[in-house]
Image (cartoon, rainbow, N blue to C red):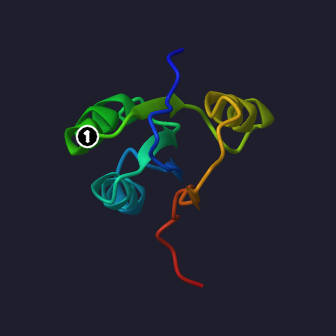
Amino acid sequence: MASITNGHGLAMVTGASSGIGYELAILCAHNGFDLLVVADDPKIEEAAKQFQNYGGEVHAVQADLATREGVDKFYEAAQGRPVDALLANTGHGLGRSG
């Protein structure tokens, strides 16, 4: 795994393959952050390619954060680098009221 350090701050964004998480990752990238993005969806790799258009380093992790293994995988991907912003936007709405 390549190091993701280049002098920029690091933003970790969960649920970044689509929806609000995707938009939050774009905002972070647009504001100069390197990104470490995660989703349980394989679309996270395609999303990461889009985030690279903003010039920062981007590392994508496909993992289920509802599991200990997924959380460990995401945490380890930071490689001990200080985290400047954590945008925790993970989970699926059920679309029900009540």
Q: Residue at x 35, y 58 (%)?
A: 19
Q: Residue at x 60, y 85 (%)?
A: 98
Q: In the picture shown, does residue 55 fall above or below 3?
A: below
Q: Position of residue 38 (x, y in %)?
A: 51, 40
Task: Point out the image quarter for the N terminus.
Answer: top right
How many marks do you count on the picture? 1
The extreme top residue here reads 1
Q: Residues within 10 Å of mark 1 (few under 14, many from 20)?
A: few
Corner quadrant of residue 24: bottom left
Q: Position of residue 47 (x, y in %)?
A: 31, 39
Picture quadrant of residue 50? top left
Q: Residue at x 44, y 34 (%)?
A: 6
Pick out the residue farthest to the right: 68
Q: Is 83 positioned to the left or the right of 20 in the image?
A: right
State the residue position of label 1. Answer: 55
| Above/below status of 32 relative to 36 | below
Q: Element type at marker 1? A: loop
Front-most of residues 68 and 33:
33
Depicted 34 relative to depicted 2: above or below: below
Q: Position of residue 7 (x, y in %)?
A: 46, 41
Residue kind at label 1, given as amino acid type:
Gly
Which residue is depicted at the point 33% across and 40% down? 56
- In this rendered view, identify the residue nearer to me: 62 or 82: 82
Q: In the picture provided, is 57 more to the left or to the right than 89?
A: left
In this view, the residue in front, 80 or 20, is 80
Q: Residue furthest bottom?
A: 98
Q: Could you say which is closer to the camera, residue 89 or residue 37?
A: 37
Q: Position of residue 52 (x, y in %)?
A: 27, 36
Please identify the residue farthest to the front as the structure is shown. Answer: 7
